[in-house]
Image: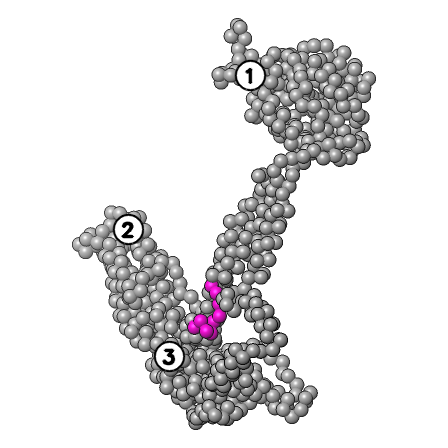
Amino acid sequence: MSFITPQVLYLVPVVAVAVALLAATAARRRREKLRLLLGAGATDPDAVILSYWRRRLRVVLLALTLLALLVAAARPYWGSELVDRGFRGRDIIVIFDVSKSMLATDLAPSRLEHAKYLLRELVAAESGTSFGLVAFAGRAYLSCPLTADPTAFNQYIDELSTDSVPLGGTNLELALKCAETAFKSAPGGHRAIVVMTDGDELTGDSARAVAELKKADIPLLIVGLGNPDIGAPVPAEDGTMRRDRSGALVTTRLNEERLSQLALETGGIYVRSTVGNTGLAALEKRIGELGLTDREDGRRSVPVEKFPLALTAAAVFLLGFLLLGERPLRRSPLVALLCVLSCLPAAAGPGPEAAAADSGMAAVAASDQTPEELYNAARRQQLEGEAAAARLQYERVISHPEASGALQARSYHNLGVGVHTDARGELAAAVDALKQQNPDGALQQLTRSAETLNGARELYARGLALPEATENLEQTRTNLRQLEFDRRRIEELKRRIEELKKQQQQARQQTRQAQQQNQQDQQNQPGQSGQQDQQGQQGQSGQQNQPAPNADQAIDAARSAARELQRQAEALQQQSIRDAAAKAEQELDSAAEARRRQDREAAQRHLDEAARQLGGGSGEAESEGREPSSSGETGERGDKSSSAGESGQEGQDQSASGRDAESDSGTPDRKPSGGEPESEAKPDTSGAEQLLQLLNDEENRRRGELRGPGRARRPRVEKDW
């Protein structure tokens, strides 16, 4: 199997890699969303009804669909067939010189190869033209009759060589007569002969053949190959240059005068082809002047394309992708349809066995818990610290078909409280990591805490979106204020940790720069050493070789960076980083003192020690040239009340308010109690004014809807919190 446009297949590995990356990214995002929404229930098979192998099979089907489309775009085919077509064209016979003189290399790579290249370009440019080929040297023969198939004609061009005609020489008369015979076997108008030769040692009576061409009104379009001024040597088969019997070098030059005369006699043109100017444009222009002839019985060979097979395969794969679901087989729509069809015979009337089964199902339904009982059980579990079990119960309340809107709103609120509590616990863990001198671990905990807070915010928002959320509105407002306060504390702490890491990296870079500058000074003054400076030559050496200002400036910059690192580490209580920065500053002071004494070797030792202190002060692996990410710099920096110790203490404040409602399975209409677990930490409400304004607008809108339809106007929300 071959392809008409095989370049399209280069996209196959690109598409395969793109589908794999997109599938992996989608799977990761699904896991994150499920974890934020369900928490521990994200791995519960009852909460997440999914068949992973069916999902993977859908991805494979999608990839196969795209690959089949690419194969179809490449237009596969095998075999060919002759088809009839009516077209307009002209007839061109090409007389091609294959004598030994065509091996001359005055046209790179040779006259022969240059002429073959020019002929291929001419065939590609003249679509609809029938070409024939006559190869000649000492003799001539018709290599290819007139054909409109460029592919077949190009194959005959590739076979041309100096061995095509065994007899040497350049007999143009025989070649012209052979072309006339080819025209007679395929009569038609608008004909021309293209001659590609160097014209060297022309033999035969070409004048008589030219006279016949003039009678038939067939012009000669002659392409001269070679140099008319300087003779070029002719290579031999063994790689040497040809010599005559006397040992003289055989040369060949273009017979431009004779070729021009032949072209003018027939009303044609002469074109000299060189590497810089092939003469193709002049040939195309003259051939275009011949005009076109209508041809009704033209036949050409066309490939048998099989792209419909690839399109059919793509349609089958796409249909399988659309019909295949991701639910397990026992819950698939096909199984449900079969169950419905199996129940159709029961329409004639249930028998005694069916009545017994119905009574059993009714008993099971009667024993199920009501939404109120599920809610009260979940609330008791949440107050007792069983967070995972409580979340599963709340989710069952939300998905229960008989649950009221108020009960669903309370469930969303309590789910948000649970996730909010987890976020505060992660914040406390980040503070503990800081106390343990682990800023990287603290930064990871803060990032997770921020993501968990986003999940709690979404749950609060879902509860507020229900129309029956008015009775729980005040508690949700309080928790949202606390959430905004916690978010600002996380962002402030992340900002300070990232600034510390950035300052640590800057101190390392400044110290390395000072090392490099000091090493350059040592290389520029190899005769000066620290021992000579200590033997009483400080004054003279100081006058003759002043210290390089670049190195001293780099040391001063490193000292400033080390002092700033000490200040930031002390503010975050990072004792190990502060001690390392202090030792590094002492070494930098010693290096500066050694520089003043012109003792560059001692200065280099102190600089190396300072770099070592800065490279391992925090116990982390040094990453060359990498700076920490600053994802938390969007927090408000004016909040100075959230220190590391306070964050850890306030992160533990979580209590419950309200009364617990007793569940009574005999009274399914009994409503639950109104208390929900919530945070009682005193929030800083100065940074949550915009969020509170949105909550007030939402409360006013809902009250307006309770007064009557059409009286409340929905405020335009500028930010989707």
Vertical placement of residue 99 versus 668, above or below: above
Vertical placement of residue 225 versus 715, above or below: above
- Element under label 2? helix
Q: Label 3: few (<14), some or many (≥20) within 10 Å? A: some
Image quadrant occupied by the N terminus:
top right
Please state the horizontal and vertical placement of residue 428, each as a whole percent of the image: 36, 79
Q: Which mark is residue 234?
A: 1
- Element under label 3? helix
User: Looking at the magenta stretch, what is its main secondary structure?
Assistant: loop
Please state the horizontal and vertical placement of residue 192, each as a whole percent of the image: 75, 24
Which quadrant of the view contains residue 207? top right
Q: Which residues are magenta?
A: 44-52
Q: Amino acid at mark 3?
A: Gly
**What's the coloring here?**
one colour
Residue labelled with disc 3? 425
Which quadrant of the view contains residue 128? top right
Question: Which numbered disc, 3 or 1, marks the residue closer to the eye?
Answer: 3
Query: Which residue lies most toward the top here?
Result: 246
Q: Which mark is residue 522?
A: 2
Please state the horizontal and vertical placement of residue 513, each as a whole percent of the image: 34, 57
Q: Nearer the viewer, residue 280 or 319?
A: 319
- Element under label 1? loop
Q: Residue at x 79, y 25 (%)?
A: 188
Q: Amino acid at mark 1?
A: Val
